[in-house]
Image: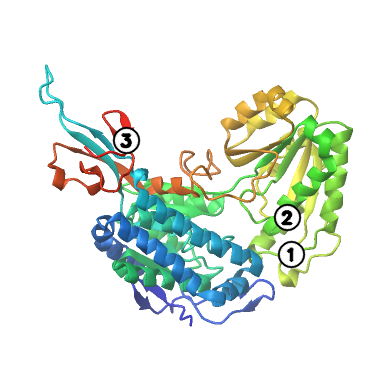
Amino acid sequence: MLTGHHLIAGREVSANQSPFQALNPATNLKLETTFGEGTAELADEALQAADSAFDALRTAPAETRAALLDHLADEIMALGDALLERAHQETALPMARLTGERGRAIGQCKMFAALLREGSWAQMSIDTPLPERVPAPKPDVRRILQPIGPVVVFGASNFPFAIGVVGTDTVCALAAGCPVVVKAHPAHPGTCEMLSRAVFNALRKAGLPDACFSMIHGRGYEIGIELVKHPLTEAVAFTGSLKGGRALMDVAAARPHPIPFYGEMGSINPVFILPGALKERAAKLAEAYVGSVTMGVGQFCTNPAMVLGLKGAELGEFVTAAGQQAEKVAPQTMLHRGICETYEAGTAVWSTISGLKLAGQSTVEANSDATQAACRIFSTTLDVLEENEELRREVFGPCSIITECATLEDMLRFARSLEGQLTAAVHGTADDLRQYAALIRVLERKVGRIIFNGFGTGIEPCPSMHHGGPYPAASHSFFTSIGTGSIYRFVRPVCYQGFPDDCLPTALQNANSAGSMRLVDGTLTRNGL
């Protein structure tokens, strides 16, 4: 049963300020339950509570935090079909997609639980003393990564489970030992409430304080700013638009005590098609490309919004095949009306640009009453692309531009001009890769993930995944928001010198009871001292 309440450290607070209801984007009808705007007072209460719980969470044994995540996986599953149905009503995402995403969220909980139990993620380093060394004795020095404090999380509209209340940001922050305050997404507030209750159930089963977590509703930007600028907030995780992310990033930097802002803010994810791929499989490649463009109605941050290929008959075949594939795509409902209106406005601007041609679009007309978007594939030349800045900006939705380059140097020039991207894809043969190695060298400086003979859509949450990139794709290119590496956003190194063994953090003590990998006097080992 939904209440519409803010959930502050386990306490329910009525949300009666600036009330709003979620809309079903497929029907544009209001859904049951009224939510309300968070306030500065609520932000303060949530962060005061989080700070009060920090010591309990950060000093809890790794097994306790791992058990918390296992319980959270169970609690998410225990919500059953009611969770899927509410998320479907609020986002119009298909039930099959939501079922798969729920599995991903549960899998992430278990992945981080395993990471905690193994323990090596904390990068323990030990240099044993040499008291007899001359001219000066060497002290006992040990270092470990420690949690930083309360974290504020802004989830994504397009992944209500995997990048939301119980998504990677929340899970890895709790795993690190950081309390979390979530700003609920206003497009799916009921889903956020259900998942927040699952977090509290998991905390109680693990014997940890309710104050380790809070969730605040809000449609306006004011509550987000209050959470970011609060003096007890130590880091912020954000997934969303460049405009919204940059605004919060500036708030984080302008504080008297600046804090890290980890924003994932989208990109155009260029695709470079080399001659070998066009010769071998132009039609099949066009089908896979349009499938990636329209996956999730184009509402993925890794959507391939730009394709570049060398001028020739094979590229012409690819453009024709892509246009034909686009015509077969039925319009689908987007996440909410705001995203749909922005998509329509963006592609309308594109349509006015001389030299940009419509290669193909959905033959069935989109139903605006059902918040639907049609697929649109455009084609142009590099000179048109370079003369029109708006063509190189992300339009979130099922659209993309195929660009003809006269020479390899033209393709390289475009690659060098790119802003930071989350992904870039290169299609070709092994010989193409060798011949066009200069392109890969350029992309290594521009993107977070380079895909060969594939597309950026579809991300595997695993230790090797990097979901980030140079600005403006992300606020810091070193960090990932998906995979086990995401935990490093919420920790910092602490060094201990000359401490008695029993006064050190357990993972730094001589016994190494967890058998974790540690760097001891320059050598990696699982042995105790």
Q: Does 2 appear above or below 517?
A: below
Find disc 1 in the rendering and name its residue: 332
- For marks 2 and 3 on the same chain, the one whose residue lies earlier in the sequence: 2
The reply to whether callout 2 and callout 3 are in contact (CB within 8 Å) is: no
**Classed neighbour count for the residue bearing mark 1: other residues with Cα under 10 Å, few (<14), some (14–19), many (≥20):** many
**How far is mark 1 from mark 2, CA to CA?**
9 Å
- In this figure, which residue is indicated by the disc labeled 3? 525
Three-letter code for the amino acid on which mark 2 is drawn: Thr
Q: Is residue 154 above or below residue 198?
A: above
Task: Judge depth for marks 1 and 3 and give the one in front.
Answer: 3
Disc 2 crowd, CA 10 A, few/some/many (<14, 14-19, 20+): many
Residue 264: give x, y in percent of width and height.
52, 49
What kind of residue is marked 3? Thr
Side of 511 relative to 353 (left or right) = left
Instruction: Tell which circle, 1 or 2, labels the residue nearer the N-terminal end.
Output: 2
Instruction: Examine the image and state in which quarter residue 56 appears.
Output: bottom left
Query: Where, by quadrant of the figure, is residue 361 drawn?
Result: bottom right
Q: Nearer the viewer, mark 2 or mark 3?
A: 3
| Residues at marks 1 and 2 touching, judged by CB atoms closer than 8 Å | yes
Kind of element beneath mark 2: helix
The residue to which callout 2 is attached is 294
Badge 3 element: strand
Name the image quarter holding the C terminus.
top left
For the question of whether residue 352 can be seen, the reply is no
Q: Residue 19 — which label?
A: none
Q: Nearer the viewer, residue 231 or 103?
A: 103
The image shows residue 243 at horizontal and vertical percentages of 55, 51
